[in-house]
Amino acid sequence: MKYSEITYPDVNNGEGCRVTLFVSGCSHRCKGCHNPETWNFDFGKDFNDDVKIRLFDIVSKPYIKGLTLSGGDPLDSYDDVLELVKEFRNRFGETKDIWVYTGYVIDDLLNLNKEEILEYVDVLVDGEYIEEQRDVSLAFRGSKNQRIIKIKERYL
């Protein structure tokens, strides 16, 4: 898996001060995307054990509420991201939360056998960015069709 950057403290991609990992690769290629460079699966740097150790070290700071996965589309690198969120839960339990941004809608995850990740994610922001539905007044999303789904409250 490749990633374009890690940002922190980030208050734009979820509630509270967060660490955001921008995963490279996206099959959606939404018109008007604010990160089109991350569509390419080979863009950026390798996500390796050293990067993961640094990421977890940053997340462990007491003022960091959790981890956000964005991109690209992190669920286009499903196996690697699933492994990452499992390790995250093993290390942090429920003391830190996980937000995932994806162009897929939740039903797509079920149809594509990608639903296991929902066991580890607290909040899913789903749906492709639709430029014609852009709304800068929305919190934590770019277009009106996108939903903030609190997985733990709604499904578990």
Image (cartoon, rainbow, N blue to C red):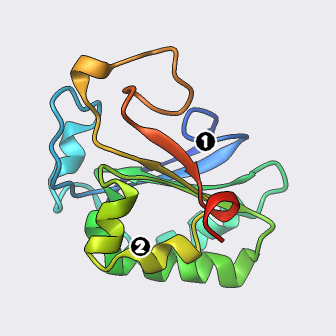
Q: Residue at x 51, y 71 (%)?
A: 118
Callout 1 touching callout 2 (CB < 8 Å): no
In the depicted view, which residue is nearer to us: 9 or 99? 99
According to the picture, the residue beneath numbered tag 2 turns out to be: 81
Query: Disc 1 residue type?
Result: Gly
- x, y percentage for residue 44? 26, 55
Quarter of the view holding residue 106: bottom left
In the depicted view, which residue is nearer to us: 139 or 154? 154
Q: Say which element carries label 2.
A: helix
- x, y percentage for residue 71? 34, 50
According to the picture, the residue beneath numbered tag 1 turns out to be: 14
In the depicted view, which residue is nearer to us: 6 or 146? 146
Q: Earlier in the sequence, mark 1 or mark 2?
A: 1
* Residues packed near mark 2 inside 10 Å, few (<14), some (14 to 19) or many (20 plus): some
Q: Residue at x 82, y 48 (%)?
A: 63
Query: Disc 2 residue type?
Result: Val
Q: Is residue 14 left or right of residue 93?
A: left
